[in-house]
Image: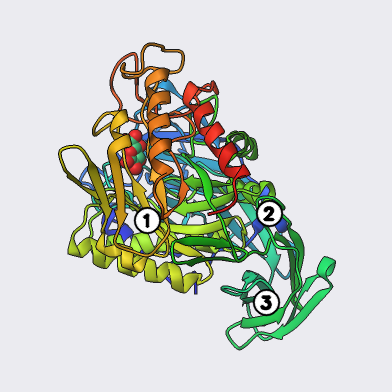
Amino acid sequence: MTFSQRFLFAGFFSFLLGVVVSAQVAPLIANISARQTTNLDGQWQAIVDPYDVGSLDYRAKSLNDRSAFFKDYKPQSPSELVEYDFDTSAQLQVPGDWNTQRDSLLFYEGSIWYKRSFDYAKSPHKRLFVHFGAANYRAAVYLNGEELGRHEGGFTPFDFEITNRVKPQGNFLIVRVNNARAKEFVPTVNTDWWNYGGITRPVTLVEVPDTFIQDYFIQLAKGSTHQIAGWLQLNGTQLQQKVTIRIPEANLSKTVETDATGHATFAFDADLTLWSPENPKLYAVEISAQTDNVTDRIGFRSIQTRGTDILLNGKPVFLRGINIHEEAPMRSGRAWSADDARTLLGWAKELNCNFVRLAHYPHNENMLRLADQMGIMVWAEVPVYWTIQWENPDTLHNAENQLQEMIARDHNRAALIIYSVANETPVTEPRNAFFRQMIQTAHSADSTRLVSAALQAHESDAPDRITITINDPIAADLDVLGNNEYIGWYVHQPADADRTDWLSSYNKPLIMSEFGGDALFGYHGDSNTRWTEEYQENLYAHQIAMLKHISFLRGTTPWILMDFRSPRRTLPRFEDYFNRKGLISSRGEKKKAFFVLQDFYRQLAAAPAP
Ligand code: GCB
């Protein structure tokens, strides 16, 4: 089950925060947009708490009395000392990273407490959950002065049941979000993107019947283009029910019975128009139990590999991709909205892409929903990045949990074809063991999709040729190989790509998951001058010439669509805390290299598949 490991972190958090965990995250509810919801977004009261005085006393012991911020205690007399007050504190927008809402928070890493009040008239025989799209990195959630539970991981959703805690009036929801980095976390302390903190995605109250359809997986069976196979899961007390899956447009209806645990599996033939970038067909799929029903829009396609080919609906396809960070166009903060997604994916379409790599962590659900509608295939990734603590079992559980939460949210999106379990990790035996476990977790949570990782190959130089061989031991376990290379930026000169040969020890498809170089939009010079648009343009031209000769190459995702903030990038004038490898500036201006890639992809789109 995708949600089976959602209870793993209680001990870990108690250790970190020194408090007793009173409740747990609930299993994720699928497709909340199709549910009866109340949105809690807007201005929340916020207390910036760099020393954690809201949770720890001056001996660093955890607080549980009225001085704990989650109690939202008000002085009862003029003489009473209470050193916090949500209601007179400034506000922060939810959803939103805090860093770009106030100058003083740009580099902030620590705790901020959020408070939002609400009334709620719950209908009888209904259950209520509070759902968070994401909060980076750790969240502790309290309702009416009691802890609901905690969550770790900055990019995946979580929810808590509040059925028996919500009152018709005067509820106060308090969330402590902490984005401090730590070595054992996922990601670890060292990354190349901004550590945007806060409640970065919407907060929603979700009302469902006493026994409800909690999750379902309705996709084509692995390798099939005409058989739907999947499962569904009820949650509640009436677990044994008849449930009907209907696709009215295709005249399909299948009734199954759930077992004593509320689970049912099914498989049935279906004659469907298959989803593809050329025709991103989505069907309305209705799931009706006796106590609940829910509707989704689902596309059906198959994705497989055969030797070095990637097959979409049984036919070889080349993935014309681009990397994307979850960075907001025009305003350089954490992206979250449907408008942000439309802009980013619209640019990918303009490049003639049929594929995007959503680096380096799960992006917001709008990206997946829109990719489904626009016909853009997706590589989705978890933040196992660079130097994770491979030997730490808590780190592994954390990474697996983030992977499972990502899969649980997105497993019905046709656009999603590849799960990536890591990016650029140094090869060691503990790392390989960590990976094998991650790959197995991905395959067992969803056997229909391909699993990949962005690896780094090793080169051997002869006097006039460079040879790069894909020989990472973990490649044997992956379905598709990803490789990052920076010829012309971190190593060699751009023209050295012309004398580079690529070899692979595996009969598997390769995606060149990164290549590129920085350019400051509007800075011009000759193609040997770093940071100019001409340098980047020339680098792309040489890269493309090289890529055309890699016989086992089945996709490319250059680094990256748009410039993004990064604390690693300190060089004044050119970087100013931005990674400038974007083909588009943070203000939406297209650099020269954009048109080089656009042209390459135009040619590829017109050419017959490999
Ligand atoms: C990489 C990383 C990516 C960086 C990029 C760079 O290899 O995967 O996260 O941002 O290089 O610009 O150095």
Residue marked by disc 2: 33
- Of pointers 1 and 3, the one earlier in the residue sequence: 3
Residue type at mark 2: give it.
Answer: Ser
Tell me if 67 is positioned left or right of 189 in this view: right
Residue 115's spot in the image, x, y percent?
Answer: 52, 41
- Closest to the camera, between mark 2 and mark 1, is 1
Report ligand 1 position as a quadrant. top left
- Closest to the camera, between mark 2 and mark 3, is 3
Instruction: Give the spatial CA distance, label 2 vs label 3.
Output: 27 Å
Residue 113's spot in the image, x, y percent?
Answer: 43, 40
Q: Secondary structure at mark 3?
A: strand
Tell me if 90 is positioned left or right of 496 in this view: right
In the displayed structure, 519 sits above or below 174; it is above
**Residue at (26%, 58%) from the top-left corner?**
471
The quarter of the picture where residue 510 lies is bottom left
Residue type at mark 3: give it.
Answer: Gln
Tell which residue pokes out farthest to the front in this image. Answer: 464
Residue marked by disc 1: 453
Residue marked by disc 3: 227
Ligand 1 contact, mark 1 (Cβ < 8 Å): no
Instruction: Give the spatial CA distance, label 2 vs label 1.
Output: 31 Å
Tell me if 304 is positioned left or right of 40 in this view: left
Residue type at mark 1: give it.
Answer: Ala
- Of pointers 2 and 1, the one earlier in the residue sequence: 2
